[in-house]
Structures are given as structure tokens and as C-alpha cells.
Image (tube, rainbow, N blue to C red):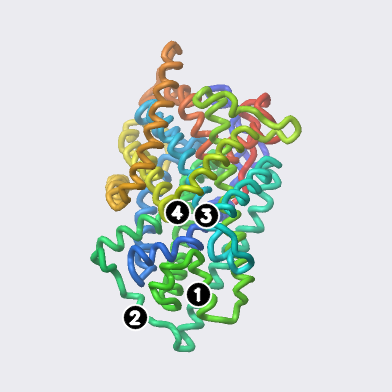
Amino acid sequence: MARLGTRRPADPQGSPALKRALTTPLLYFFILGDVLGAGVYVLVGQVAADAGGAVWVPLAVALLLALLTAASYAELATKYPRAGGASHYATRAFGPFAGFVAGFCMLAAGIVSVAALARGFGGDYLSAFVTLPVGLVAVLFLALLALVNARGIKESTRANVAATVVEVGGLLVIVALGAWLLLRGDGDVARLGQLGTPEKGAAAAVLSGSVLAYYSFVGFETSVNVAEETRDPRRSYPRALFGALATAGVVYVLVGLAASVAVPTDRLAASSGPLLEVVEAAGGVPTRLFSAIALVAVANGALLTGIMSSRLAYGMARDGLLPAVLTRVLPERRTPWAAIAVTTLLSMLLALTGSVATLASTLVLLLLVVFLMVNTAVLVLRRDRGEADHFRAPTVLPVLGAASCVALATQIEAEVWLRGLLVVAVGTVFAAVAAVRRGGRAKTPGPAGGEGHAGEAGSAGGAGHAGDAGPAAEAGRADGAGPADGPGGRTERGG
């Protein structure tokens, strides 16, 4: 293992290996910064509408379901500690066609997520300052984010560090206000056990609410791309991953408890700024101050996801999987302006045609497709030794993880399924075209795909390098280093 500050030898494909610089604490905060984010600021009310007053229950269930899939990621990330993520794993297990579909679903999920957050930005939090049509705000917001994205990844990730501190602070304020309400006897503890709606019983309501709550935990899956840059992936990655998810889960459950106690369920469900309702009920914190915190959280989540989406589109286009026009970069900034423009326009279109809840559910559906592939890939790849010393999840966990993906998918509405299936169909067409283009290319041998599939992942999984990693894997090629600098030009993404 190379020491900090050195570069390891090139991998078998000729690409220089990444520097192992991340310790367990650094990796923990990287993952925590990815998971703790904007979703809970805008979706707590929608979870209450689906599940009833006990908002904390779907959040706890979503945490447990996320941990099942996280166990599969922990095994694969330590078994194959290289940037690539779900697309790379699917390519190894099922071939480049499945790898491309996984990468394309990640791209689509990112675009949908940005659209959802743009609509959330234009809701009640912004209304504390000015009242404008949500659609107009979403379009202007996305245009501004695109300009920040095009300016460069270094500036974007610097803004992320400060914004992450602000958004975590906002969640802790909500927890403290909920405790204050209880201490002064103003909260309604009875709501903590209220599950179910007039349309659904308790069990169905919890599962339905867990679909939206699941959105709050997404982000951990991108961390697999920095396993290659971790000093001791076998020990560090599982600890950091499970620790960060557990920390985020505790914070989210406490936020859910505070929201349930502080605000009547119907009022919480009707708000597009649900945590602002907690602030108003408790008092002591200026509503404009908390609204500003929430807007920073939403903007930060949208910015980071927008960076990931544009870099994934750029990487897939560079590998010949998407139109070549998406590889165009600004001469000075070396940022992929064409990919940024196209992904932003698609997010604008989605933001104008769907609600926050519908878009969030669409994102979850697309990620469930990816997570199903990852959970089954773990079992398929058990025949491949990979790294000799890697984390191994008990077999029951990936099985339960795959089952949980199917269970959550059954709770998604028909309208969302229509959107999701359309995206998957488009991805399948692109994958078929890419397969035809690769048809005449010689395949290199390797166990379970081995180096052969890894090599083909330059087309299918290469998109995964760009997409799942986002800035961590591809920013060096599109920002600063430029495409001509080849695979070695990579920069780390700020947590």
C-alpha cells in the first residue's frame, strides 16, 4: 500500500492509480456530508401525509432499509476498491449492457433530484422573503446553479463545505426546538404513535412513507468511488459508511420526533416548508433566519447533484455512449458547459411538470433499480475473489436488500412508474446502441468479467466512473486538467 503523498503504480489498464489519502474520520465526514442534506427539509411534510403523525417511524424504517443496501456496497467497495460504483459492479456481474443501464439510471436520478430540489427552493421557505410562482423560481434557480457549476468545481466544493455546516446546524436547531416544546409542555406526544391515514392502514402507510423517507438517505452510494483513495478500505470504509448512516439516521429520527410533537399532522402535510412550521410553533428563532438556512441546504444539495449529473453526462459522452456534443468544455474554465446546459434544461422541464413528492418518488424508483442490481451483483460476484481481504456481508443482508427494493417499488404510484419506465426504456435504447458499436471490438478475458468486463466498463462502466463518482472521478478531466490529461486528472469532491 502506498504511503500518503505518493502515487501507486498504474492499474492493468494503464491508468495511474489514485492516491490513498482518506483516513476513516475523513471518509466518515465525506459520507455524512453526502447523506445529511436537503431532502428532509422539504419532504417531512409529505412523509406525514403518507404515513400519519408518527413521522419518525418511516424515517427509522428507511434507515434500516438503506443499511441493507449499504452492506452490499461495503462488500463490493472493499472487494473492488476503485472508482466506478454501481455501473462497475453491474458490468462485472452482468456485463456492459447492465452496467450502462445502471450508469444511465444514476444520471437520470441526479437530473430528477435537482428538479425536485428546485421546486422545494421555491416553496414556503422562500415565501418568508418573497412570494413568486414556484415554476419561475425553479427555472431561475436552476439557471443560477448552472452558472456556478460552469464556473468550476473548485469554487463549487468550497461553497459546499460552508453550506454543509449550515444545513446540519439547521437540523440540530429543529431537534433542540422540539425538546424545548416538550419541556414547556406545549407538544402533543400522542402524535408520536399515530400511524395510518383514512386511505391506508398502519403497515401500508409506513411503507408508503418510507419511499419518500428513503430519499433523505440517498447519497451514500456515491462514496464507493473514493474507496480507491482510502488508506485501508477493508477497515475504514465499512466503519465510515455504517457510522455516517447511523449518525444521519439518528438526526433524522430526532427531527421527525420534533416535527411530530410540534406541529399538527394536517398542517405539517400541507406545508412545502415543514420544518419552518416547527420553528413557528416553538418560537425563539426568527423564521427568516431558519428559512435562509433551509434555502442554503436545498441549494447546496441541488448544486452537488448538478455537478454529479453534468460530469456523468460528460463522461458517458466521452466514452461514446451519449451524443459527442456533450463533451464540449469551456476553453478557460475547462468545465463541461454542454453537459451542464443539457442536464439543467432537463431538470427545468421536470421541475415544471412534476410536484416535489412525484419527483422524489421518481428518483427513489430509479435508485431502487440500481440498488437491486448492486444487491444481486454481490451474490453473483461471490465466485470472484477480488481483493483477498475484503469486508463480507452476511448473505442474508443482500438478499433482504434486494427484497426491500422490490417492496418499496410496490408502493410507488402508477404515474411515477410511468416516468421511471420511460427513463429506463431510453437508457435501454442507448445501451443497445452502445452494444452495437462495441460489437466489433475484441474482448479481453477475465474471471466473472474480470479485466475483460472492467475493460468494457470503459464504455459502460466508464460512465459509472464519471457518474457515480461525480466530481470525485471526473472533475479532473472536465475541470482544470481537461480531457487531454487522461484518466490521471482527478480531483476529490468535497463532503
Which amino acid is tagged 2? Ala
Q: Earlier in the sequence, mark 1 or mark 2?
A: 2
What secondary structure is marked by label 3? helix
List the residue tagged with mark 2.
Answer: 190
Q: Are marks 3 and 2 in contact (CB under 8 Å)?
A: no
Question: 356 or 233, which is in the foreground?
Answer: 356
Q: Report whether residue 387 is seen.
A: no
Which residue occupies 67% across, 47% down?
A: 156
Q: CA distance from mark 1 to mark 2?
A: 17 Å
Assess disc 2: are there few (<14), some (14-19) or many (≥20) residues with their C-alpha within 10 Å of its C-alpha. few
List the residue tagged with mark 3.
Answer: 119
Q: Are marks 4 and 3 in contact (CB under 8 Å)?
A: yes
Q: CA distance from mark 4 to mark 3?
A: 7 Å
Mark number for residue 278?
1
Where is the N terminus found, in terms of image quarters? top right
Which residue occupies 40% across, 76% down?
A: 264
Question: 398 or 280, which is in the foreground?
Answer: 280
Assess disc 1: are there few (<14), some (14-19) or many (≥20) residues with their C-alpha within 10 Å of its C-alpha. many
Q: Earlier in the sequence, mark 3 or mark 2?
A: 3
Which amino acid is tagged 4? Ser
Q: Residue furthest right?
A: 332
**Residue 190, image x and y in percent?**
34, 80
Q: Is residue 439 left or right of residue 177?
A: left
Q: CA distance from mark 1 to mark 4?
A: 23 Å
Which amino acid is tagged 3? Arg
Assess disc 3: are there few (<14), some (14-19) or many (≥20) residues with their C-alpha within 10 Å of its C-alpha. many
Mark number for residue 165?
none
What secondary structure is marked by label 4? loop
List the residue tagged with mark 4.
Answer: 355
Classify 275 as above or below 410: below
Q: Residue furthest front?
A: 133
Q: Earlier in the sequence, mark 4 or mark 3?
A: 3
